[in-house]
Image (spheres, grey):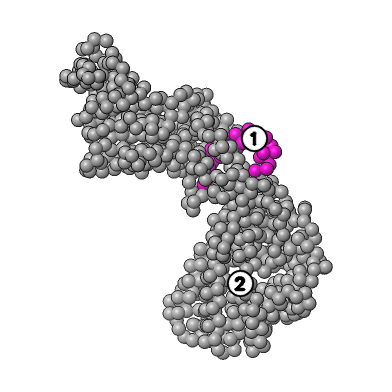
Amino acid sequence: MSRDEPHNIVTGTTTGHVLQTAEIHGDVHLHTTSPRTVPRHLPGTVRHFTGRQRQLAALTKHLEQAEASPEPVAISTVEGMAGIGKSALAIHWARQNIDRFPDGQLYVNLRGFAPAAAMQPGEALWGFLHALGAPHDTPFLDLEAQAALYRSMLAGRRMLIVLDNARDSDQVRHLLPGSGACYVIVTSRQRLTGLMVQAGARPIRMDSLQADECAALLGAFAGTDRVAMEPCAAKKLVELCARMPLALTILGARLADRPELRLHVLAQRLREARLDTMDSGGADVNISTVFSWSYQALSPAAAGLFRLLSLHPGADFSAAAATSIAARKAGRLLDELTHVHLLENRPGDRYGFHDLTRLYARDRAREHPPANRDAAILRMLDHYLHTCVAADGHLGSPWEPLTLEPPQLGTCPETFTDAEQAAAWFAAEHAVLVALIEDRAWPSSHTWRLARSLVTHLDRHGHWRDFVSTQRAGLAAAQQVADTNSQAYAHRLLARALCRRDELDEARDHLSRALELFRDDITGQAHTNYALGYLDVCAGDTSRALDRTTRALTLARASGADVWEAKALNNIGWCLIEAGRHAEALDYSRQALDLFRSLDTDPDGLAHTLGCLGSAYLGAGDPEQALTCYLEALRIREQNRNFYTQATTLRHIAAVHRTTGNDQAEQAALRQALVILEQLGHAEGPAIRAQLARLI
């Protein structure tokens, strides 16, 4: 082309040619004349852009903060998984703020994760140089020389540069201005940590749309009246799309194309073939295809872990669990997966899938032979079972410990040094453990033992619904594969859970069945009679409770089960308290206390005995001794994070203060109890609130 020929490169450049070239000492210099070219590269307006106010504001804030600082160039990175709307955000913001950049806008799709080869930096630079006015017959330059010329041509200009779909920091490093009032927005599925460290880039994380934004996006395509006519179906479509903009856009376009298609019909199709229904026919607007571009960029080891992790039933998981699933150290592979947003970092140093990436990973998991998938599942189950048993061993559980066979080769169960670590693990893995137990797809041999190992955690923290549901699943599993003694334990533990829910009739049935199955186990008979006595007290039959518990004491002493002897002694004391025989109760509860202190293995039993002893002292007219016992019980329960019984003990402490006329202390104790009960969602909360209202 001639030196003064106008040109229009890529998606539009305004002219007037400008430059002359000369070669001096091997370096290319371009001498400009005015007017400058003003590139207008931005793609067209994003159709039906919805929401993202926080991210839009962040882009504006980054620019304005850079303008007020000595930083030479403002750089923002927009990061997130495929289909989450990174490019749409960058282009929409650019269109809204086009007047801020009078010298033009440069845009390039770097094809970082496209099936074709990613664009080389030199190719992108040549496009930019030509857009800025460099003639097409400019002599060949190596990459560093191109970048130097590019920086020179940007000097003094106020421009926006959008580097879309970058593969990594290295791909964009040469495309950054050196100085001037330019603003660079880089979008990527990767975390561009190098760009943050080397160039001061500021990240913006993209996540799923809000539910109302999703409904608005669907309405923009299909019509707001149409969406409003089927609100439940619209909500279901949003859920099945996992609030992903690309998925919603595909479904919205399908609804727009077929006005007769009802939303509930589309929702049903989506349930039956979720990813297939999100196929628009074009590769760049097909969910599976878009995910595949990220997946194909993984190392073989990371791709294998991605597939196997989809077998995990929980909403999130730890690196330790991933290590057992993979049968190899997983930390580096997890970093690789989160780096490209195929996995998400979750609070507590955990990881999880977006709903749609989990579905894609499950589809890819079929690439593993069934034997490999089964082996990974067994390693996962062994990981949780062995770790659960180890953690339970630190909680002072009164139940007979389980004997386990060695875990599958490659499994790496976690270990603990104290009860605090064990309790923290149970808190983090609670939802995963419940999901494993309640899902009947797993082997029964793991299910009943996991259920039994979870009892102390669930009971101590007041998780009554999960307590009942896991013990029902555990009983069903034990009845399929376990021996008679283990089935008896399963009935016994389900009864305990039902007592916590005041479902006493069903609890009695399970205890009766446990007693039948424990016919050759004296210890089992002892603690089942103890439980029947506890149930009778709850039912208000103290006479029968005393008979049952006395029988439990005789059996415990005959079997040498010291823990259950101590529990039976204390339960006799409780029965006597309920019968108003406080002086007699003191003797039994003191015996129980001495035995629990000597054993030093059951903190819950010790705290319960101190509570009963406090009630006996209070009934016998000694509130000072009662308060001492209750306060020690509260300290033990706080140490062991036994929340429900903390609330119970605080109510007893309030009763002592009521007896002594200390109204302020009574109210303070009740308020603490109320906070705990409301956090647990316990039914006793309203009664405490009403009691407080009467005191004020």
* Magenta span: 351-376
Q: Is residue 6 magenta?
A: no
Local SS, label 2: helix
- Outermost right residue: 520
Nearest to the observer: residue 60 or residue 37: 37
Left-right relation of 84 to 553: left
- Outermost front residue: 25
Q: Main secondary structure of the magenta part?
A: helix
x then y, percent, for residue 14: 24, 20
Q: Residue at x 68, y 76 (%)?
A: 567
x then y, percent, for residue 268: 59, 36
x then y, percent, for residue 670: 49, 74
Q: Residue at x 26, y 22 (%)?
A: 132
Q: Is residue 370 magenta?
A: yes
| Residue 163 visible here | yes
| Above or below: residue 646 compared with residue 11 | below
Crowding at dot 2, Cα within 10 Å, few <14 / some 14-19 / many 20+, comes out as many
Nearest to the observer: residue 563 or residue 358: 563
* Residue 554, image quadrant: bottom right
Query: Counting residues from the N terminus, which is met first, the one under dot 1 or under dot 2?
Result: 1
Mark number displayed over residue 604: 2
Mark number displayed over residue 502: none
Q: Amino acid at mark 2?
A: Asp
* Residue 637, image quadrant: bottom right
Q: Amino acid at mark 1?
A: His
| Above or below: residue 517 compared with residue 300 | below
Left-right relation of 125 to 294: left
Crowding at dot 1, Cα within 10 Å, few <14 / some 14-19 / many 20+, comes out as few
x then y, percent, for residue 425: 56, 58
Q: Give the position of the C terminus as an image quadrant.
A: bottom left
Q: Residue at x 23, y 27 (%)?
A: 152
| Residue 238 visible here | no
